[in-house]
Image: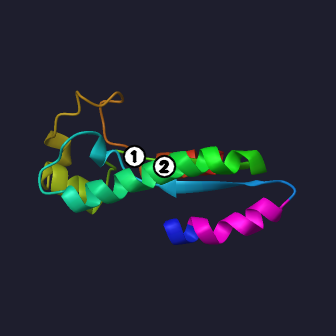
């Protein structure tokens, strides 16, 4: 992510229209998660880098955003979190009362 953003900066800065950088992270690091220290640290770094570069690059008309989904239906990550039967998992802690979908992530990214 850092290398991609570093490579994108000069072309976006030179553009008279600025630009948008959209990074993908995860909500995994917002709470403690068993045996996930490496991915949690990586996702937290993506979020922090995105926030800081949004401040630094804003003066050039470059927006930096980050989409950080939680559990997504039909993915190996959801299977790890909930076992083979994600339908039996309680989603009461999730505002929509269900896992997200790939289409919802795509819509968030395209909206940027």
Whether 103 is drawn above or below 15: the answer is: above
User: Residue drawn at (48%, 45%), measured in percent from left and top?
Assistant: 104
Q: Is residue 16 magenta?
A: no
Q: How many marks?
A: 2
- Pinpoint residue 95: horizontal percent, then vertical percent: 34, 27
In the rendered image of this protein, does residue 5 appear above or below residue 109?
A: below
The CA distance from mark 1 to mark 2 is 7 Å
Q: Position of residue 85 (x, y in %)?
A: 15, 50
Crowdedness near tag 1: few (<14), some (14–19) or many (≥20) residues, C-alpha within 10 Å: some
**The furthest residue to the right:** 16
Residue at which label 2 appears: 105
- x, y (%) of residue 111? 64, 45
Tag 2 or tag 1, which sits nearer the N-term?
1
Residue at 73 percent of width and 67 percent of height: 10
70, 73: nearer the viewer: 70
Q: Which residues are magenta?
A: 5-15
Please give the label number shown on residue 69.
Answer: 1
Residue 9 falls within the magenta-colored stretch: yes
Q: Are marks 1 and 2 in contact (CB under 8 Å)?
A: yes
Q: What's the magenta bit mostly, secondary-structure-wise? A: helix
Which element carries disc 2, helix, strand or loop? Answer: helix
61 vs 104, left or right, is right
Furthest residue toward front:
56
Q: What residue do we see at 32% from left, 42% from top?
A: 99
Q: Would you say 1 lies left or right of 53 here?
A: left
Q: Position of residue 96 (x, y in %)?
A: 36, 30
């Amino acid at each position: 992510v850092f290398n991609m953003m570093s490579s994108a900066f000069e072309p976006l800065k030179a553009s008279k229209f600025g630009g948008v950088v959209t990074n993908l992270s995860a909500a995994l690091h917002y709470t403690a998660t068993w045996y996930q220290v490496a991915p949690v640290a990586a996702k937290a770094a993506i979020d922090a880098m995105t926030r800081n570069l949004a401040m630094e690059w804003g003066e050039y008309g470059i927006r930096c955003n980050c989409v950080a989904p939680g559990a997504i239906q039909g993915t190996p990550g959801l299977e790890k979190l909930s076992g083979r039967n994600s339908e039996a998992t309680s989603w009461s802690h999730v505002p929509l009362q269900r896992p997200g979908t790939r289409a919802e992530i795509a819509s968030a990214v395209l909206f940027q």
